[in-house]
Image (cartoon, rainbow, N blue to C red):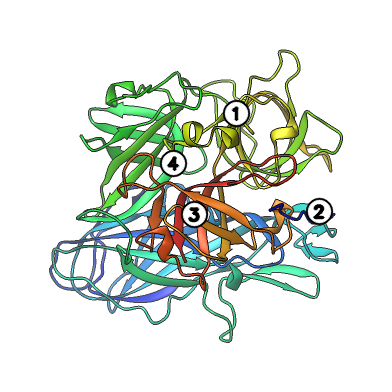
Amino acid sequence: MNRQKTFSFTFLLAALALASCSGPFKGGSASGGGGGNATLSFTLIADTPPASPSLLAFKVSINGVQIKPASGSALTLTPATPVIDLMRLESDSAFLGSLSKVPAGIYTVQVSLSNPAVSFLNNSSSTITAGSTTCTAGSVCTATLTATGNPTVSSFNLTVAASANQGVELDFNLNSAISLSGGTLSVNFNPSASSPGVFSAFNLPRQNANLGSNQLELLEDFTGVVSLGGSNVTVTSPVRGALTAVESSSSFFDASPDGMMCQTPASFSCAVNGQVASVDGFLNSDGTLALKEYEPLTSTAQDLVEGIVYNVTPGSSTQFSIVVTDKVQAASGSLIGGLSTGDLLTVNLSSSPPVHPFLVDTKGLPVENSFSVSYNLFATQTTTAAIHQGQSVALHVSAFTAASGRTLASATVDTVTLRWSRLIASVTGAASTTQINVNTVPSYFGFTSASIFPTEVFTGTLGADGVTNLDGIGSANSVNPSLPVGLRVLYLENSTNSSQFPFMAAKIRQQ
């Protein structure tokens, strides 16, 4: 069936305090409370995007987490890398850090947020004003806004037992934070009492998280430059900070998109200092990370930009546009140091030398062997005939021109790799263990809300290599059709928008 194109926080914690901090944060000493030696880990997800505008990026600064005891001085936890793109968390989870040596007591916790910046498609029929940005109907725009606040998590009480290892996931409601009224777009971290709060929270692991013993959450597709130390793998991103995970006999290693690194069967020996890699890691209950999966992307640090395609230039076989969502920089002489998440970028495929045949990052899923027709809709192609709105692509930049006035930044690229589109959609029709169908995809895909996207689910032992990660459901056929799903998918489409399985799912999260 052809898909139809469109035209055109405080919260109360029982037994919580901070004595020391592990992970990407640094903290002070504890005050107040009784004895204890618990560890409490925090993660963050996002859901419920607004119908309008259609968000492609939503950056926010997490300035600090302040913990206030009933008496005594407050403790503030400041993230080493405080800027997060919330849209990435529609399917994934971000690790905020772990508090160790937590003594008993009752504490108030506030999360200070500021500096929201959004990139969005104006899918309304009228002009939208956002800060100093005027965005006409049908345009994709960026805006920096001025909201600050300490959003409240209501109706959530957490009891931490002495010496316990526990986790809390904070859930950011995108729709509650975004307001579009009278043509004006604004962000409010403390919406009125009639609106749902920006944050809710729940204990980890969530039901049907499909995790192992002493595992709280799965952190996926953290991309950056690799540094090895013994069995530790540290991946450092100029956008998202650093993540360190410990390799074990249960870790697995997938081949690079070009097939040249970590060829099957592969082991830890294929991981090399200086590679750019994507890693998945289990957040353990003690706040450490265990390496689940390692996938090299390039052999050296290079200027790589990842982004969501929002336009393919009509009549051109070589030009399209993206919203930047991630990047890695060359070790020296980087061309893209000034690019940030949410920036708009015009992309030109290199003609001299010609762009390399396109690649697909399958991350271990058997797409090439089981769905070769779909795979080759992108793999080996060399023109924008393979590029579609809503796809996420990673690009090696060979030349770059910075933005100037109203002229967008532009890049010439010689390598194009299909990566993972992240979205929230509605389930429609019957589901099986190997397939679900979704609609109401984000407007920036360019389809009507009724258009159906068959989504392939890769089955097997949950958590194994080559199997779709499920969160909140035990199997795909038990998905609740009355609730949305967060998806991380490869988007493989043909020229008539009739591919049998346009979505190949690496992750399905029941909202």
Q: CA distance from mark 1 to mark 2?
A: 30 Å
How many residues crowd mark 3 within 10 Å: few (<14), some (14–19), many (20+)?
Answer: many
Say which of marks 3 and 4 sits in front.
3
Q: Secondary structure at mark 4?
A: strand
Q: Which residue is mark 3?
A: 435
Answer with mark 3 or mark 2, whichever residue precedes in sequence.
Answer: 2
Q: Amino acid at mark 1?
A: Ala
Q: CA distance from mark 4 to mark 1?
A: 23 Å
**Residue 342 x/y as whole percent:** 65, 48
Q: In the image, what residue occupies the spot 15% across and 73% down?
A: 34
Q: Are marks 3 and 1 in contact (CB under 8 Å)?
A: no
Q: Amino acid at mark 2?
A: Ser
Q: Secondary structure at mark 1?
A: loop
Q: Which mark is residue 222?
A: 4
How many residues crowd mark 4 within 10 Å: few (<14), some (14–19), many (20+)?
Answer: many
Answer with mark 3 or mark 4, whichever residue precedes in sequence.
Answer: 4
Left or right, residue 210 beside residue 406: left
Q: Secondary structure at mark 3?
A: strand
Q: Which mark is residue 379?
A: 1
Q: Amino acid at mark 3?
A: Gln
The image quarter in which residue 50 lies: bottom right
**Residue 7 x/y as whole percent:** 83, 55
The image quarter in which residue 316 lies: top right
Left or right, residue 511 beside residue 415: left
Say which of marks 1 and 2 sits in front.
1
Q: In the image, what residue occupies the spot 30% across and 57% down?
A: 210
Say which of marks 3 and 2 sits in front.
3
Q: Are marks 4 and 1 in contact (CB under 8 Å)?
A: no
Answer with mark 1 or mark 2, whichever residue precedes in sequence.
Answer: 2
Q: Amino acid at mark 4?
A: Phe
Q: Which mark is residue 139?
A: 2
Q: CA distance from mark 3 to mark 1?
A: 23 Å
